Amino acid sequence: MDYKEIIESVYQKVDTIENTGELATYIPELATIDPEKFGVHISTISNTNFGLGNFQEKFSIQSIAKVLSLCLAYKQLGESIWNRLGVEPSGSSFNSLVQLESDNGIPRNPFINAGAIVIADILISNLKNPREDLLSFIKSLSANKNIAYSPKIAASEKSVGYRNVALCNFIKSYGNIHNDPEEVLDFYFDLCSLEFSCEHLSELFLFLANNGQTRQGKQILTKSQSKRINALMQTCGFYDESGEFAFKVGLAGKSGVGGGIIAIHPNQYAIAVWSPKLNKKGNSYKGMRFLEEFTTLSEQSIF
Ligand code: GLN
């Protein structure tokens, strides 16, 4: 499969479409990003690596990081994490509060904010130095060790993080947050502030296309755990647009309000796309379009 040729042709096509959508202006720092940035990078199991556009520029990965924190919690604690949150698509927006009351504070899945906040709480309870330990875990996923939180982005989100504060306190009222809400939220905002390039991101996530094993041969998750993370990305990775992503793209994936998307084809590749303007569901407009065209032209999707 000549991914290079396919990516070149799809990039050119999608680059010319009207870039509708909005920046994630609810986080002040994200409102300052150049909306015309557009990058893509693929990393394959057979060691093809190819990128185009702004693929070497770092951007705020936001909710894509929820996959990394989930993988660490799953690795450390195994199936017991599912006592604290579910594995069902929510059909609601990423920051919704509505289902938590009827679900008694048990978030539907780990990729909505409520679920990622519970995972942050689990990590705080089980790690000595959660912030540092998460970075070490991420460093173990690829050869690139250049990883840091962005204090500027974390502070920017914290300054307006009223909804996440509400979510965390609401879940705490049901007993499903065990630590101090402020500590949990600070860790959650740090997690969301991680910045990577498309190139680095596709390298990081390749282990999920490779049955839980990195290119360097390190077994990060078991085969079964890796399958399950992919299943969750497939069913919940795009919030109330997860069905649409499965329907049009047909890959396991996860989006973030920084405009990034990571998508996985098990046993084949990980591909990262970045374009900051978001559609109404909070997912990258051009990123979705790119991946739809990419799986159409390559005829390489899970289904
Ligand atoms: N940090 C963002 C928030 O909590 C993450 C949301 C996202 O990327 N969908 O609102």
Image (cartoon, rainbow, N blue to C red):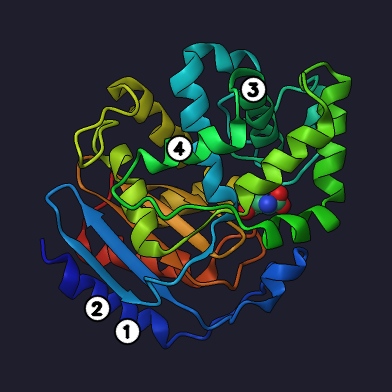
Q: Which residue is mark 2?
A: 8
Q: Secondary structure at mark 3?
A: helix
The amino acid type of the residue labelled 3 equals Ile
Earlier sequence position, callout 4 versus callout 1: 1
Q: Which residue is mark 1?
A: 12
Q: Which mark is residue 122?
A: 3
Q: CA distance from mark 4 to mark 3?
A: 17 Å
**Residue 264 to residue 167: above or below:** below
Do the residues bearing badges 4 and 1 touch, measured as CB atoms within 8 Å?
no
**Residue 66 to residue 107: above or below:** below
Q: Quadrant of residue 266?
A: top left
Q: Quadrant of residue 284?
A: bottom right
Residue 20 x %, y %: 59, 79
Count of marks, rendered view: 4
Question: Given this view, does label 4 or label 1 mark the residue nearer the observer?
Answer: 4
The amino acid type of the residue labelled 1 equals Gln
Q: Which residue is mark 4?
A: 136
Earlier sequence position, callout 2 versus callout 3: 2
Location of the N terminus (image quadrant): bottom left
Earlier sequence position, callout 4 versus callout 3: 3
Earlier sequence position, callout 4 versus callout 2: 2
Q: CA distance from mark 1 to mark 2?
A: 6 Å
Q: Secondary structure at mark 1?
A: helix
Earlier sequence position, callout 3 versus callout 1: 1
Question: Given this view, does label 2 or label 3 mark the residue nearer the observer?
Answer: 3
Residue drawn 65% across and 31% down? 120
Residue drawn 20% across and 39% down? 216
Q: CA distance from mark 4 to mark 1?
A: 37 Å
Residue drawn 50% across and 41% down? 135
Residue 273 x %, y %: 41, 65
Task: Determine if the C-beta at disc 4 is less than 8 A from ligand 1.
Answer: no
